[in-house]
Image (tube, rainbow, N blue to C red):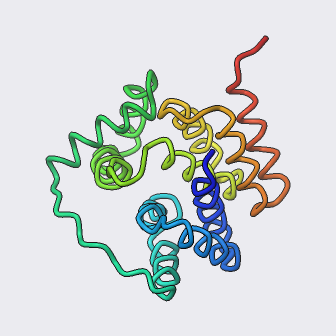
Amino acid sequence: MESWVRDLVDLAAAQAAGDTSGMETAFERLQVAGREIEVEEALLQSYLFLGFPSAIEALRRWRYRGAAPPAAAHEGWDLWLERGERTCAVVYGDHYDQLRQNIARFHPDLDRWMVREGYGKVLGRPALALEVRELLIVAMLVVQGESGRRQLRSHLRGALNAGAAPADVEKTIRRAAVFAPAEHRQLALKLWANLQPKG
């Protein structure tokens, strides 16, 4: 795992934990490394898992460090749908059809929003590799503990489906766990162990 990816993982976990000192440390390292675009993408995607208030506050802190906002993306619904279906299918692999059915059973609009907005508008953006995005999602979910259990299991698998090395997924869990209570670390490592091939 490259050092800037480790710093992004730390940023995602610190944001999820509300650890502003940890965020500032990660910001500093990422600015020195010239990874401003990656920070922008990490903070933008955080609203999917941490909510708008957290994303807005994180972006406010980032702007106070002198980072200028990028130009707006001029994209639309049709692109988001096509990109969302493709991205979601990569993350969920053989479980994609079942996921769509399950979410549509919960609410058909949520299924459309998940694909078009979550995976098309946000996670399918080309400025950050999908495997890195998935590692950042894992980091945020590790910090959330039991409340993020199902999502964490899905995105541990999703990180692998997107091309992340198993060693990098485990490193992400361990780095994120620094910002979480011990029981969250134990839960994440148990879920990860259950995904590993037996024998």
Image coords of residue 94 (percent x, y): 44, 21
Judge by depth and name the residue closer to the eye, 167 or 151. Answer: 167
Judge by depth and name the residue closer to the eye, 17 or 161. Answer: 161
Which residue ends up furthest to the top in the rendered image?
199
Image coords of residue 168 (percent x, y): 65, 40
- How many marks the image carries: the answer is 0
Q: Is residue 54 left or right of residue 108?
A: right
Residue under the image location 56 percent in, 72 percent down:
32
Residue under the image location 47 percent in, 72 percent down:
55
Residue under the image location 49 percent in, 67 percent down:
34
What is the quadrant of the N terminus in the image? top right
Give the vertical position of 25 relative to 115 (above or below): below
What is the quadrant of the C terminus in the image? top right
Give the vertical position of 199 relative to 30 (above or below): above
Looking at the rendering, which quadrant does residue 29 occupy? bottom right
Image coords of residue 100 (percent x, y): 36, 34
